[in-house]
Image: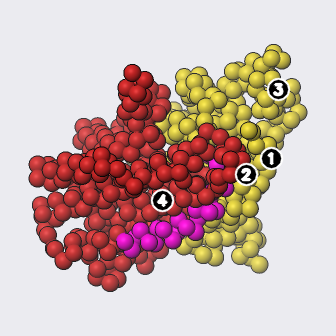
Chain colours: A yellow, B red
């Protein structure tokens, strides 16, 4: 029984992390119709920026009030979104709207390659460690098991992020405009919607979520080159399983991948990497467009 | 069949390439062997691109071919390059025959992502299988050629000549296939799939066939790369490896077969020189290069030749 509880809790923590990193990806695809490989780079830039900012915070005497490091984490994600979002969307992606989806994947792949090296130039190749925020929340005892409190904070962040995205899309005026743009950009434009601004806003929001994922993860790991490579490929699996562009889909996808990975880690460690893509392949075999994708008519 | 002119072109190409075995320095010969091996994989992607599909997981076959050859060589002590290529090709044919019909129903991004998932399944499994080396991979002995056991420069030249012959043969076969009725159906499906179906052709069959060709070519490329490097590891199936293959395919475009190998050699050259002069910014250079190709040369290198040909035709 304990084993199942462990798998469930571990899976939930991993799923929460997965959801934070994938929800931005699915949002950007939903609005801009671009599957953004550079999402992984934004995640890594978020991790680096937050590592630098939290490091700087403790460098200037933040020890007196360590909780301020959480503000530094969030501020890092906002900073990355505000700098990188407009730069990528206005500077590059807007020239590729309406082009072939696969071509756009390649464009973002090029951006990903460029950013990978740009990060090495800015932050070097040595790892960064910022463990302070991770230990700050103490431990949580669950039955006979101890968990780090921060892990549960990640679950809370994931829930807040999910609700915030869902609410702002479905319960606000801007959100409804965004849904209209997703449904038919051309028609929205004729109705007076400033479509480029919606695209920019959605991309910045996506970049923020990617960077937030990185910023939240930075205290849990050593921040070093190659972070983005693995993240993007897992996030792909999540959003494809859930159906591209679907936010509930990303949540279900994250839970499926999170729990199967946790089960595999405890029961069959050799299959840890294998299981994620295996789940994705199985889902796609039966639901070619993912679990929550809207059905679309074939165009002649 | 190939006409007289085509046969002459094929023989001429091989003669020119073979001359390289004499005049090229060792490093260049190795570079070209690797480039051509990868070019074979990319030729498979180009075949799929003609049908409008891009596989982001061709590393699957590159890796499967490399591991098949290595395991076969290490278990049975067989080093003959012809035999190893045949075994890898057969194994990849079987894998491609299994997945091809399944994947043939997917289009666009879903085809790309599903093929990527399959290659990552292989990557994940191989990394964790310590019996066959895990992430360290395996070594493979130098190849022999029908009983001939060269060493040093002769080995390099032998491998180079073998790859050249293989590339010319594969290029000719694929060229023939691209211009066959079945190959042209794929090209038509790229423009409008539904119309092709209404005209009575099976798009699914065309896509499956393209995929299976890609699988076999990928396996051959992987085998050659493994023999040239003397080593295989799971990175062969990692998605960034597949990404490079797609890069070459985009650079080449789907209009010309020789362009694929030219593009593969350009990429290897750019990689070698950037590694030498800008070791930390090679990916950056590659990314900028990829963007430049997408913007400035959307049809790839092949479109340059094609454009010239069309202009001459018009005159």
Q: Quadrant of the N terminus of chain A?
A: bottom right
Q: How would you classify the magenta stretch by its main secondary structure?
A: helix
Residue found farthest to the bottom: B76
Q: Which residue is mark 4?
A: B213
Q: At x 74% / y 67%, what residue is drawn?
A: A8
C-alpha span from label 2 to label 1: 8 Å
Q: At x 69% / y 58%, what residue is drawn?
A: A284
Chain label for disc 3: A
Q: Which residue is mark 1?
A: A295
Q: Which residue is mark 3?
A: A177
Q: Are marks 3 and 1 on the same chain?
A: yes
Q: At x 74% / y 38%, what residue is drawn?
A: A300
Q: Position of residue B4 (x, y in %)?
A: 30, 49
- Give whichever of B195, A134 is nearer the camera: B195
Q: Are marks 1 and 4 on the same chain?
A: no
Q: Secondary structure at mark 1?
A: loop
Q: Are marks 2 and 4 on the same chain?
A: no
Q: Which residue is mark 2?
A: A289
C-alpha span from label 1 to label 4: 31 Å
Q: Is residue A250 left or right of residue A39?
A: right
> Which mark's residue is nearer the viewer, 1 or 4?
4
Q: Position of residue A73 (x, y in %)?
A: 61, 38
C-alpha span from label 3 to label 1: 21 Å
Q: At x 30% / y 46%, what residue is drawn?
A: B5
Q: Is residue B141 above or below residue A233?
A: below
For the residues bearing labels 2 and 1, Cβ distance under 8 angstroms: yes
Q: Is residue A27 above or below residue A88?
A: below
C-alpha span from label 2 to label 3: 25 Å
Q: Is residue B105 visible?
A: yes
Residue range corresponding to the magenta coloring: B86-109
* Residue A205: mark in rendering: none
> Which mark's residue is nearer the viewer, 2 or 3?
2
């Amino acid at each position: 029984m304990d084993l199942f509880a462990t798998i469930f809790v571990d899976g939930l923590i991993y799923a929460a992390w997965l959801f934070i990193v994938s929800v931005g990806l699915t949002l950007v695809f939903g609005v801009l119709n671009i599957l953004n490989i550079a999402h992984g780079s934004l995640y890594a830039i978020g991790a680096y920026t937050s590592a630098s900012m939290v490091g700087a915070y403790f460098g200037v005497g933040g020890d007196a009030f360590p909780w301020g490091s959480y503000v530094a984490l969030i501020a890092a994600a906002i900073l990355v979104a505000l700098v990188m979002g407009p730069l990528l969307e206005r500077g590059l992606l807007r020239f590729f709207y309406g082009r072939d989806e696969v071509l756009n994947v390649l464009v973002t792949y090029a951006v990903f390659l460029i950013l990978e090296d740009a990060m090495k130039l800015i932050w070097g190749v040595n790892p960064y460690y910022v463990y302070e925020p991770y230990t700050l929340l103490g431990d949580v005892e669950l039955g006979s098991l101890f968990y780090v409190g921060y892990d549960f904070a990640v679950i809370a962040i994931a829930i807040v992020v999910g609700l915030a995205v869902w609410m702002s899309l479905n319960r606000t005026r801007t959100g409804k405009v965004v849904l209209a743009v997703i449904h038919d950009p051309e028609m929205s434009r004729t109705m007076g919607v400033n479509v480029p601004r919606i695209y920019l806003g959605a991309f910045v929001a996506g970049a923020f979520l990617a960077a937030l994922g990185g910023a939240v993860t930075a205290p849990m790991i050593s921040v070093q080159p190659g972070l983005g490579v693995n993240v993007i490929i897992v996030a792909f699996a999540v959003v494809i399983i859930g159906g591209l562009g679907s936010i509930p889909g990303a949540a279900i996808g994250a839970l499926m991948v999170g729990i199967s990975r946790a089960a595999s880690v405890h029961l069959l460690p050799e299959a840890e990497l294998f299981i994620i893509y295996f789940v994705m392949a199985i889902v796609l075999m039966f639901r070619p467009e993912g679990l929550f994708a809207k059905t679309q008519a074939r165009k002649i | 069949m190939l006409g007289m002119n085509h046969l002459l072109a094929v023989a001429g190409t091989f003669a020119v390439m073979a001359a390289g075995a004499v005049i090229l320095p060792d490093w260049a010969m190795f570079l070209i062997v690797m480039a051509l091996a990868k070019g074979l994989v990319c030729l498979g992607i180009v075949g799929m691109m003609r049908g409008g599909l891009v596989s982001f997981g061709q590393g699957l076959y590159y890796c499967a071919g490399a591991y098949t050859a290595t395991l076969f060589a290490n278990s049975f002590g067989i080093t003959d390059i012809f035999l190893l290529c045949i075994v890898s090709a057969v194994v990849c044919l079987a894998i491609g025959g299994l997945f091809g019909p399944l994947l043939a129903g997917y289009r666009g991004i879903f085809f790309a992502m599903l093929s990527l998932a399959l290659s990552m399944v292989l990557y994940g499994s191989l990394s964790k299988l310590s019996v066959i080396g895990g992430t360290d991979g395996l070594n493979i002995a130098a190849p022999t050629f029908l009983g001939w056991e060269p060493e040093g420069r002769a080995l390099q030249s032998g491998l180079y000549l073998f790859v050249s012959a293989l590339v010319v043969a594969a290029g000719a076969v694929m060229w023939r296939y691209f211009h066959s009725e079945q190959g042209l159906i794929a090209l038509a499906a790229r423009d409008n799939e539904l119309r092709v179906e209404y005209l009575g052709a099976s798009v699914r069959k065309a896509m499956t066939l393209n995929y299976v060709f890609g699988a076999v070519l990928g396996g051959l490329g992987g085998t050659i790369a493994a023999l040239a490097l003397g080593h295989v590891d799971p990175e062969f199936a990692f998605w960034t490896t597949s990404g490079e293959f797609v890069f070459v395919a985009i650079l080449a475009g789907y209009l010309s077969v020789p362009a694929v190998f030219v593009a593969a050699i350009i990429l290897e050259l750019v990689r070698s020189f950037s590694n030498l002069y800008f070791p930390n910014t090679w990916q950056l250079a590659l990314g900028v290069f990829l963007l430049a190709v997408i913007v400035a040369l959307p049809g790839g290198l092949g479109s340059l030749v094609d454009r010239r040909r069309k202009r001459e035709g018009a005159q």
